[in-house]
Amino acid sequence: MSLIEARGICKTFNGRSGEHIPAVDQLSLAIEDEEFVVIVGPSGCGKSTFLQMVGGLERPTSGTLRIEGQPIDGPDSRCGIVFQEYLLFPWKTVQGNIAFGPSLRGLSKGEITSLCTHYIELVGLQNFASSYPHELSGGMKQRVAIARALANQPRVLLMDEPFGALDALTRESMQWELLRIWEDARCTVVFVTHSITEAVLLADRVIVMSKRPGRIKKDIAIGLPRPRT
Ligand code: ADP
Ligand code: ADP
């Protein structure tokens, strides 16, 4: 059983004049545990829609989509999501943003603090735990968003063009940073980007979508298989 299994999934949106817009059409795809999968493809080919369906934010119109063999019935703790726009809670500090998920899971105060400390250190924001999002640079905000997603200890980290709003230098340093973070987190990553360079640097596997919604043009393994420990 694969960690994520999509079988013939379709997603259709209703356009303004009632027309049906196929965002994903008959997509079948299996993603394994601890893979780092990058999805690239032309704008509008359904990359974000696929990610949102895996994250439970959208529901497939038809077909089956499962994580660990279980259907996805809305957002749940199996997936953490990082968006291009960060989407941090502006009224919460860095620590408050990261504690949010764990605090919903009924953990003790001590457990929440130790999760926060671990993930704040992992993303290198030890000196900013009490800062508010508006006091941080774009790269730092995205580090908070990554830490917030990981603090729920998800099986899958979904990232939708996460570095797309950053300047070129910050973007490059965040790419290396993410590889380091991922070594620690050891979850499955599904990462959407427009950048082939980013895809090749980060991925174990690159899925190239075609312009036709939901069609896979190429499915490419990158580099050597990582040893499993
Ligand atoms: P990508 O991420 O590859 O750029 P998207 O998944 O965002 O593609 O979009 C796929 C198609 O679905 C596009 O034609 C887009 O306009 C349409 N679409 C996406 N979300 C919605 C929505 N909420 N309502 C209507 N159409 C949508
Ligand atoms: P990207 O290419 O980075 O995926 P988009 O501009 O295609 O960005 O989409 C950004 C967001 O807007 C997505 O969450 C998508 O679901 C939504 N969206 C895209 N197209 C439409 C549309 N035609 N109507 C409503 N929402 C849309």
Image (cartoon, helix red, strand yellow):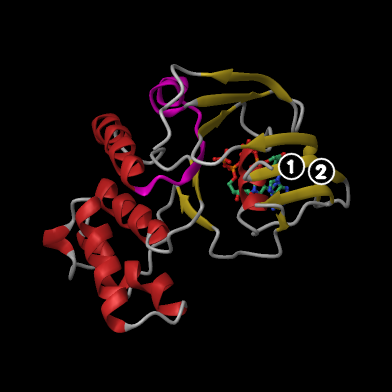
Left or right placement of residue 97 versus residue 187 in this view: left
Quadrant where the image shows the N terminus:
top right
Task: Say what secondary structure mark 2 lies in.
Answer: strand
Q: Would you place residue 52 above or below residue 28 in this image?
A: below
Q: Residue 179 location in percent, x, y?
A: 33, 35
Range shown magenta? 185-203
Left or right placement of residue 148 versus residue 78 in this view: left
Quadrant where the image shows the C terminus:
top left
Q: Residue 91 location in percent, x, y?
A: 32, 75
- Residue 6 shows which numbered tag? 1
Nearest the eye: 168 or 157: 157
Q: Residue 127 location in percent, x, y?
A: 11, 60
- What amino acid is found at the position of numbered circle 1 in the picture? Ala
| Within-10-Å neighbours for mark 1: few <14, some 14–19, many 20+ | many
Nearest the eye: 116 or 171: 116
Identify the image quadrant of residue 208: top right
- Residue 64 visible somewhere in the drawing: yes
Residue under the point 25% across and 36% down:
170
Q: Residue 200 location in percent, x, y?
A: 43, 20
- Residue 94 visible somewhere in the drawing: no
- Say whether residue 199 is magenta: yes
Identify the image quadrant of residue 228: top left
Task: Say what secondary structure mark 1 lies in.
Answer: strand
Nearest the eye: 25 or 104: 104
Identify the image quadrant of residue 99: bottom left
Q: Would you place residue 5 above or below residue 147 in this image?
A: above
In this view, the residue farthest toward the left is 127
Residue under the point 68% across and 38% down:
46
